Image (spheres, grey):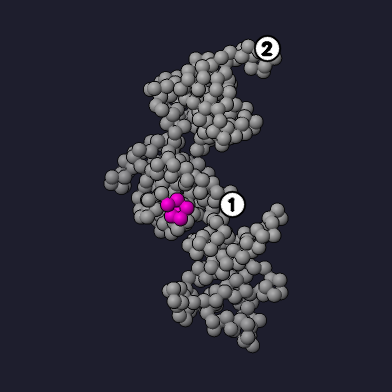
């Protein structure tokens, strides 16, 4: 619904009680009564603003009834107007007050938002562009230093003066940076309107801010498996703006990764996981609240992840003698054997820092040679260096 067809109303909320109420009705798809500006009309668009300490726009909906004054004197809302709001949806991301002020500097309401209000006509378009911020996938690199710079930017709170972006991007739009060989690597927000790049023909660039890493990065295999409708992932070589339903799937996948730090704990996920995803799974610990069945699943998948991680880290070369693996398996993988430098039988920790990838000869030496003890100490020192890289 465009701003030319309807007015846009802002309703005021108080955290955390009202935030929970909005999340509940958004989940149940039920209408909710809310105080609103008396000028509102059925069909008007509503955006909910949560006052401090959140100070952010959090949800939207549609006015479904004409506002009526609250005449009951015992009501906390006596004298105010209220209406039913339907089709309540949480915004894809919360819009901080400071960001709205930057996008809509002429809107006086934002100086001290305390009462429900109608968005001025001359501000509505800019405000809705902010609320309807889209998600774009852009490309970064490793060899050109992009990945290292993103890590530094996320750590030090830096902004990118310019990054390749779509011509249609707008300030406040979400960005997911895809780094080949890693996957979905970081998220950010567009900080300046796209402009033609002088150093890159037929490309546009925008500033980026609020850069945050996705740890571990979401591998291309996981993206393809979890979001099959994202056809861009079949050949991820350019920037793209996915449709809203696919963008929501991307947001959910990123949110899940940030909450759990690992991918799905199943054989298919581990088979296609990146080395960073394998490491995260290898370090996974079962919580005290996990059921015995869940702990057993976590232990099994963690053990598989450690084995796969170690062999992936070795990259086809024995980590004991640095020689190539002696042969390949029928599926084309270099044959190496994982070796625990601290034996599990002695209750040694099952951890990537204690498991090394060896050729059969070095593995036999670590267990049966007359210098096995000295060789294992050498392997431990080698592992310490490998884990620091």
Mark earlier in primary sequence (2, 1): 2
Picture residue at 61% right of the left edge, 77% below the top = 378
Q: Is residue 224 magenta?
A: yes
Q: Residues within 10 Å of mark 2 (few under 14, many from 20)?
A: few
Rendered image quadrant of residue 143? bottom left
Q: How many marks?
A: 2
Q: Is residue 340 magenta?
A: no
Picture residue at 71% right of the left edge, 74% below the top = 346
Q: Which residues are magenta?
A: 223-228
Q: Secondary structure at mark 1?
A: helix
User: In this figure, which residue is indicated by the disc labeled 1?
Assistant: 260
Relative placement, left or right, of 284 versus 168 is: right
Question: Mark 2 near mark 1, Cβ–Cβ under 8 Å?
Answer: no
Q: Quick check: can you spot residue 98?
A: no
Picture residue at 50% right of the left edge, 32% below the top = 99
Rendered image quadrant of residue 353? bottom right
Q: Quick check: can you spot residue 72?
A: yes
Distance in Å between CA atoms under marks 2 and 1: 49 Å
The outermost residue toward the bottom is 370
Q: Nearer the viewer, mark 2 or mark 1?
A: 2
User: In this figure, which residue is indicated by the disc labeled 2?
Assistant: 73
In the foreground, 169 or 270: 270
Q: Position of residue 217 (x, y in %)?
A: 50, 54
In the displayed structure, 285 sits above or below 17; it is below
Q: Position of residue 294 (x, y in %)?
A: 65, 58
Picture residue at 41% right of the left edge, 57% below the top = 180
Prevalent SS, magenta region: helix
In the foreground, 321 or 305: 305
Q: Position of residue 336 (x, y in %)?
A: 52, 76
The outermost residue toward the left is 201
């Amino acid at each position: 619904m465009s701003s030319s067809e309807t007015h846009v109303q802002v309703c005021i909320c108080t955290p955390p009680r009202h935030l929970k109420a909005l999340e509940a009705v958004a989940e149940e798809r039920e209408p909710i009564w809310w105080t609103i500006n008396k000028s509102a009309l059925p069909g008007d668009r509503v955006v909910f603003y949560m006052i401090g300490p959140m100070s952010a726009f959090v949800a939207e909906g549609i006015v479904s009834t004409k506002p009526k004054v609250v005449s009951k004197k015992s009501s906390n809302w006596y004298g105010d107007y209220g209406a039913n709001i339907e089709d309540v949806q949480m915004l894809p991301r919360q819009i901080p007050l400071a960001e709205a002020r930057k996008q809509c500097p002429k809107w006086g309401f934002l100086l001290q938002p305390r009462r429900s209000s109608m968005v001025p006509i001359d501000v509505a378009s800019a405000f809705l562009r902010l609320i309807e911020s889209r998600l774009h996938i852009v490309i970064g690199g490793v060899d050109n230093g992009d990945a290292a710079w993103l890590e530094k930017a996320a750590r030090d709170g830096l902004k990118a003066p310019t990054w390749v972006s779509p011509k249609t991007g707008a300030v406040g739009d979400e960005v997911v940076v895809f780094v080949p060989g890693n996957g979905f690597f970081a998220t950010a927000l567009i900080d300046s309107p796209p402009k033609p790049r002088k150093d890159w023909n037929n490309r546009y660039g925008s500033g980026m801010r609020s850069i945050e890493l996705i740890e571990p990065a979401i591998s291309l295999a996981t993206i393809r498996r979890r979001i099959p409708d994202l056809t861009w992932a079949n050949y991820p070589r350019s920037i793209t703006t996915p449709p809203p339903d696919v963008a929501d799937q991307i947001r959910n996948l990123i949110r899940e990764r940030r909450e759990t730090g690992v991918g799905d704990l199943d054989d298919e996920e581990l088979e296609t996981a990146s080395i960073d995803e394998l490491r995260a799974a290898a370090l996974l610990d079962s919580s005290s609240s996990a059921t015995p069945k869940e702990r057993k699943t976590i232990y099994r998948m963690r053990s598989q992840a450690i084995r796969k991680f170690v062999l992936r880290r070795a990259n086809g070369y024995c980590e004991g003698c640095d020689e190539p693996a002696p042969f390949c398996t029928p599926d084309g993988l270099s044959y190496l054997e994982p070796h625990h430098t601290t034996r599990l039988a002695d209750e040694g920790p099952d951890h990537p820092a204690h498991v090394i990838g060896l050729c059969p000869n070095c593995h036999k030496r670590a267990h049966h040679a007359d210098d096995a003890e000295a060789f294992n100490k050498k392997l431990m020192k080698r592992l310490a260096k490998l884990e620091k890289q």
